[in-house]
Amino acid sequence: MNAPVSAGRRPLWRWLGWFTAANGGLYLLVSLRYLQGYHWPDSLPGAIYIPLAMIGQSTVLAVLPAVLLIGWLIAIRPMRRAVMTGAVLIAALGLTLFVLDTNVFVERRLHLSLFIAQLFEPVTWIASAAMLGIALAFESLLAGMLWRWLAARPQPAGGRWIGTALALAWFA
């Protein structure tokens, strides 16, 4: 029987940071659907606020679940397989729910809730399961690609600058 693959905490935190940043970008692309039918503000501060808010919120939606649910795993038992599996599952589920929420919002101007989910047709649940399967495959490929990319780059790749910029967008 193979022993679990243990990795250092630092490479796992580095990987998780890049993984959540990439997922923040995916969330940002999905969140562009919220702008359908949106009337842009006439003022310059209002027009600047909308993209900053979308970048900040997308990042927070990607980072918070990953850090809260996977961060403790890195701190207690830094095993690459467990960390990556958990992060992929959380990211795929989050992305699927986010796509569902944007679909409901564009159609009904309501956000996803348990009440709204009770109104779904069976075909919606089947489509959601298919979306989850696609998201799992995509997130798995993304996780592996990022791990290999970071392993090939022992030097920092500008992650602190990106993290700072994303945090500033959220605070702005």
Image: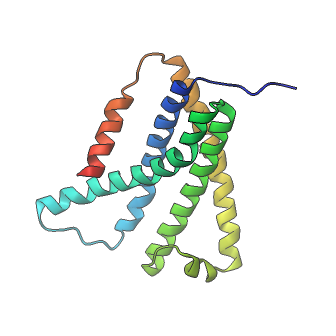
Residue depicted at x 41% and y 64%: 33
Q: Residue lying furthest front in this view? A: 76
Residue depicted at x 46% and y 81%: 108
Q: Residue lying furthest right in this view? A: 1
Say whether residue 66 is visible. Answer: yes
State the residue in front, 98 or 40. Answer: 98
| Residue 13 image position (x, y, % from top left) | 50, 32
Q: Is residue 128 above or below residue 17?
A: below
Q: Quadrant of residue 161?
A: top left
Q: How is the image coloured?
A: rainbow
Q: Is residue 5 above or below residue 164?
A: above
| Residue 46 image position (x, y, % from top left) | 17, 63
State the residue in front, 37 or 98. Answer: 98
Count of marks placed on residues: 0
State the residue in front, 141 or 147. Answer: 147
Residue depicted at x 26% and y 60%: 50
| Residue 12 image position (x, y, % from top left) | 55, 30
Say whether residue 26 is visible. Answer: no
Relative horizontal placement of residue 49, taking residue 99 as reference (left or right)? left
Residue depicted at x 61% and y 39%: 73
State the residue in front, 39 or 79. Answer: 79
Picture quarter with the N terminus: top right
| Residue 95 image position (x, y, % from top left) | 54, 56
Q: Is residue 37 above or below residue 51?
A: below
Q: Is residue 44 above or below residue 155?
A: below
Q: Quadrant of residue 128?
A: bottom right
